[in-house]
Image (cartoon, coloured by chain):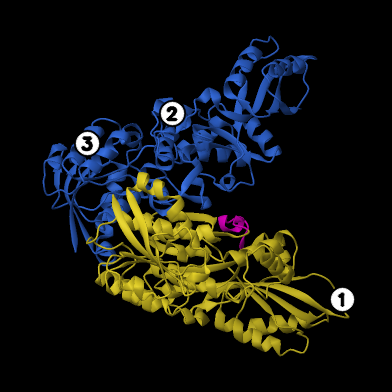
Chain colours: A yellow, B blue
Amino acid sequence: MNKINIGLIGYGNVGQGVVKLLKKRRNFVKAKYDAEFILKTLCDRSVHKKDTKDLEKTLLTTSYNDVLNDPEIKVVIELIGGLNPAREIVTKALQQGKHVITANKELIANHGKELFPLARQHNAYLYFESCVGAGIPIISTITQGMAGNKFNALYGIINGTCNFILTKMTQDNLSFAQALEEAQRLGFAEKDPTLDINGMDSTHKLAILAYLTFGKFLDVKNIYTEGISHISHDDIEYAESLGLTIKLLGIAKRVNEEIEVRVHPTLFSKEHPLASINNVYNAIFLNADPLGNILISGEGAGQMSAAIGVFGDLINLSSRGDKEQLLCNYFTEDEKLLVRSSENFRTKFYLRFTASDKPGVLSQITGILGKYNIGINSVTQKAHNPMASVPVIMLTDYTVDHSLREALAEIHKLPVVKAKTVAIRMEKLW
Amino acid sequence: MNKINIGLIGYGNVGQGVVKLLKKRRNFVKAKYDAEFILKTLCDRSVHKKDTKDLEKTLLTTSYNDVLNDPEIKVVIELIGGLNPAREIVTKALQQGKHVITANKELIANHGKELFPLARQHNAYLYFESCVGAGIPIISTITQGMAGNKFNALYGIINGTCNFILTKMTQDNLSFAQALEEAQRLGFAEKDPTLDINGMDSTHKLAILAYLTFGKFLDVKNIYTEGISHISHDDIEYAESLGLTIKLLGIAKRVNEEIEVRVHPTLFSKEHPLASINNVYNAIFLNADPLGNILISGEGAGQMSAAIGVFGDLINLSSRGDKEQLLCNYFTEDEKLLVRSSENFRTKFYLRFTASDKPGVLSQITGILGKYNIGINSVTQKAHNPMASVPVIMLTDYTVDHSLREALAEIHKLPVVKAKTVAIRMEKLW
């Protein structure tokens, strides 16, 4: 029997889920995994306000040093989130050779580059399955299940809130604002949903995934990120009529000797498997050599989904020896691989102009696009109304970002153009 | 640097793929995984007829004892397939504390029950990712990625040949025979496709999956298995018109205190994610507590897909210590869980009768079904032709297998019934 003393720091939603599992699955873990997890210390800054009546033999504390300074604690579970003091806690734990399990995507995205080597140096494990897609086994699939493959591309639907909003806009004809309200009502969006809908939550996760697939740790601030709040129901309708769907994707792909890493709403074919990942489901689609295409999807939200990811890390950790080589697959950085800067991204675009419905408008817009060498594959103008502005939809050929930005800036100065142009990238997925 | 001497037994299609990877990914493995794999001995009963010019320092032999008796060989890769002498090879290797990697699903399905404890007893690892879905990380997802979950149900499309045939019948209106021919022409079906189309290949894989999810090793001979050769294009058309699709599924699910384990063509909703897994793609859909629904799919066929599964096992093995606890999750059997015998399966059925187009036929058939308490949800008769037999389609309510078998036997004796009735199970997937 493998007995492991645990210190848990952060008794919020996920932490309470982990404690539930430690209790409920005690016999299951003994029988199936020959392990016993003992919650020795529980630390939370307001632990005395919380329900801890089931935790008789557990030391309750508000000081994380009670965990870090206890030589009997072998595994530290960090569930407080945010960069500080999480960074200090995880760093000190690893330095003492304690294993760490964390669900803190912001921490790993920002400081994985220093924490992974630190873990290695001190013969400690750093597990973090719940950082992406909660308990959906995405991290372990990439690092272990697909070990030995070289990755060509990764496309991820990794924010359940955005996916829910876009699904509702598509299926129930809701506006962005209505869909967001519905998401909040159902508990799928926070009261302050900024980090979800501006894309940054996806960017944190994508930074981790880009490292695992391409061995490159990017500065989160440098990852091109676009949210979904400018998407209108019109855009979704046009997309539908073109056989396309709009999803917020995290993308990391190799293009020759460079990788492109970006988060943005993306138009792609309704036939692609990712198009049918709806509501709060998350999914990762990978293309790898030689394995080809792999899709993994599941319900990546909620207390117990995140908690089981942490609990699964604990079980995997318990099956490993103390002095063996560390978990493979995410401790080296590929120095030679370059990261393409966003002005050089090359995609097709969906453009929605809001323009006066007057003769000559189209020729003014297309004239400027032509000047910047942007080919146009199709033009649609839905309704004529000489009294008002109307949307004009264009699909471009492949163009580099900086050309499009310059062309749109010039088009924006035209008196006939009445609002900011919406530009959504189109992607041909693997 | 972790140097590991390997003995590879079986230099067929997959073995050659593994050797290619050992050569091509040598530097990649050093840089990324800090490991070096040395192919010390290659055994094949006709090794001298094969292309081995790149294997300078490798001992070529026709005797597997040259691998088993070499104390420097730490890992044995068994790729000969079949039960004998594979069972003897794997047994002897494990008894000597050598780690084993195998892609032999027949061996694990039939003898896993003795081999897993043997591995444990001798502190050896037994890896077998390529046994199900080739390199698609199904085994590792269930055993490691989803560790700590309790499984409720598993539905798998785990035979690429059958999935290709049913896809072609559905999308290109081919008959079963035409679709099989197409599969053979494209190399997706063997010259003798018996084990694929009679379902037994899926049964071997399902036996392994049932063990991993429910901790129950079933005798392969006792697993209810039905192939796809009786499916007609008519059945697919009727299914389509009802919003259903037909796939060969491997199913293992918990029903109260029992599990049902079966392989058969299955009618289910076109809206379910498994319905869009087409051609030679494989997929596993799992429902687990607390994680909910998980889907993993990919291209589970071909030399390199199987080879990368073996290669990934090797990398995972290399990251583990010698004396640590064994891979978690598949070494205990749940004694209390009962396996439901096939006569007690309870499903809805699609029935296609071939009957004379005469008044009173329907009432004779439905009379017998009623006698056995089989409710009917819908009846369709496509065309009237008093001169010939016509198909009559019925969808039943839930019924137990033995009732249906008895009713069909009685119906078969009716003079108006002109051919064997086709019965396909309908399943409401999670």
Q: Same chain for labels 1 and 3? Say yes or no.
A: no
* In-image side of A361 versus B60 (left or right): right
Dot 2: what SS?
helix
The picture places residue A410, in percent across and down from the top left corner, at 67, 89
Instruction: Give the residue type that dot 3 points to.
Output: Thr
Q: Are marks 3 and 2 in contact (CB under 8 Å)?
A: no
Residue tagged by mark 2? Answer: B194
Q: Is residue B59 left or right of residue A312?
A: left
To which quarter of the image does residue A22 belong?
A: bottom left
CA separation in Å, label 1 and label 2: 66 Å
- Disc 3 target residue: B91
Say few, some or many: other residues with alpha carbon within 10 Å of mark 2 (under 14 / 14 to 19 / 20 or more).
some
Label 1 chain ID: A
Q: Is residue A313 left or right of residue B179?
A: left
Residue type at tag 1: Asn
Between A387 and A180, the one nearer to me in the picture? A180
Find residue A374 and report its horizontal and vertical position in percent: 61, 78
